[in-house]
């Protein structure tokens, strides 16, 4: 019995060692990063228009829980605006950030 328990413990340790560590990406707010001209070039809306859109949609986009590190409504809106404005989430060159 003790050998079986030791083997089970060893197997559990091996599984734990094989698990990938979770990586959380930086979620910097674009309103803090970009100038007004960069905001318009990137999202096709002015800074004030982006803030108004976020305010209108915030209640519908807000997650009820913080589990799984859900995206805040502001970043959800910026991702959608980026896609609607350019047809993709990344720049044509594939390199974010844009000047």
Image (cartoon, helix red, strand yellow):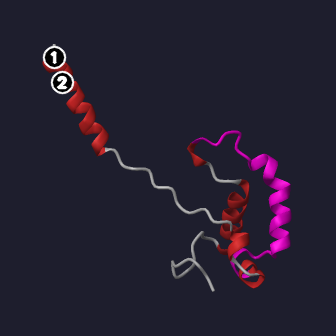
Q: Quadrant of the N terminus?
A: top left
Is 8 displayed left or right of 33 in the figure? left
Q: Residue at x 56, y 63 (%)?
A: 26
Q: Position of residue 13 (x, y in %)?
A: 26, 36
Q: Is residue 52 magenta?
A: yes
Describe the element under mark 1 as helix, strand or loop: helix
User: Is 56 on the left-hand or right-hand side of 33?
Assistant: right
Residue 27 horizontal/vertical position (percent): 61, 62
Please tell me whether residue 67 is drawn above or below residue 83 in the rendered image. Answer: above
Q: Quadrant of the C terminus?
A: bottom right
Res 73 quadrant in image: bottom right
As drawn, the residue found furthest toward the left would be 3
Secondary structure found at label 2: helix
- Label pair 1/2, CB-CB below 8 angstroms: yes
Which residue is labeled 1 in the image? Answer: 2
**Majority SS type along the magenta span:** helix
Stretch of the chain drawn in magenta: 41-67
Q: Is residue 72 magenta?
A: no
- Residue position marked by numbered label 2 in the rendering: 6
Categorize mark 1 by other alpha carbons within 10 Å: few (<14), some (14-19), many (20+). few
Residue 85 visible in image:
no
| Nearer to me, 27 or 81 | 27
């Amino acid at each position: 019995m003790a050998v079986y328990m030791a083997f089970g413990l060893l197997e559990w340790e091996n599984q734990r060692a094989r698990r990938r560590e979770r990586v959380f990406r930086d979620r910097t707010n674009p309103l803090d990063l970009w100038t007004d001209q960069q905001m318009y070039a990137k999202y096709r809306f002015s800074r004030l228009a982006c803030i108004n859109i976020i305010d209108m949609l915030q209640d519908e986009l807000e997650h009820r829980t913080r589990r799984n590190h859900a995206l805040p409504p502001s970043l959800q809106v910026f991702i959608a605006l980026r896609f609607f404005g350019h047809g993709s989430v990344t720049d044509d060159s594939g390199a974010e950030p844009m000047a």
